[in-house]
Amino acid sequence: MYAIVEIGAQQYKVEEGNKIYVHKLSKEEGSKVEFDRVLLVDNDGKVQVGTPVVAGAKIEATVLEEVKGDKVIVFKKKRRKGYKKKNGHRQQYTRIEIKKIVA
């Protein structure tokens, strides 16, 4: 059984027991989280497609940890002008574990 769920304006394919990284959620470690924007549910070949979401379907998950992603270097330069600018950015992610798919 798997589902396509929308978390923070991004879509993820999830199964029970999966551990995925999503953009930072404002939840503490160990807390329970529910996502109700389930777009598709596949239960052993029986597919339910939402219009736009599947009615009554939700995903139950647990927050495991908050981590930072790899550093991305942002470098800007204008030739012959002496302009150079270098910035770095590390995106913050929340690691969650999918406990249950309710459909």
Image: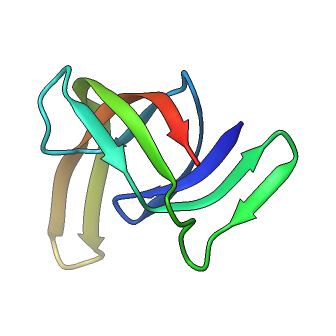
Quarter of the figure with the N terminus:
top right
Where residue 16 appears, as percent x and y from the top left, is 57, 27
Which residue is pictured at 83% across the width and 39% down the height?
A: 44
The answer to which image quadrant residue 85 occupies is bottom left
Is 79 drawn above or below residue 21 in the view shown? below
**Residue 55 or residue 22, whichever sits in front:** 55
Where residue 24 appears, as percent x and y from the top left, is 23, 44
**Residue 25 or residue 90, whichever sits in front:** 25
Most extreme residue toward the front is 56
Is 48 drawn above or below residue 3 in the view shown? below
Question: In this figure, which colouring scheme has been used for the structure?
Answer: rainbow
**Residue 78 or residue 60, whichever sits in front:** 60
Q: In this view, does 12 lie to the left or right of 96?
A: right
**Residue 4 or residue 92, whichever sits in front:** 4
Q: Is residue 38 left or right of residue 30?
A: right
Where residue 13 appears, as percent x and y from the top left, is 61, 46
Most extreme residue toward the right is 45
The answer to which image quadrant residue 81 occupies is bottom left
Q: In this view, does 34 lie to the left or right of 18?
A: left
Give the total of numbered labels: 0
Which residue is pictured at 54% across the width and 21% down the height?
A: 17
Q: Is residue 95 left or right of residue 24?
A: right
Is 90 drawn above or below residue 63 in the view shown? below
Which residue is pictured at 21% across the width and 45% down the height?
A: 25
Where residue 42 appears, as percent x and y from the top left, is 75, 48
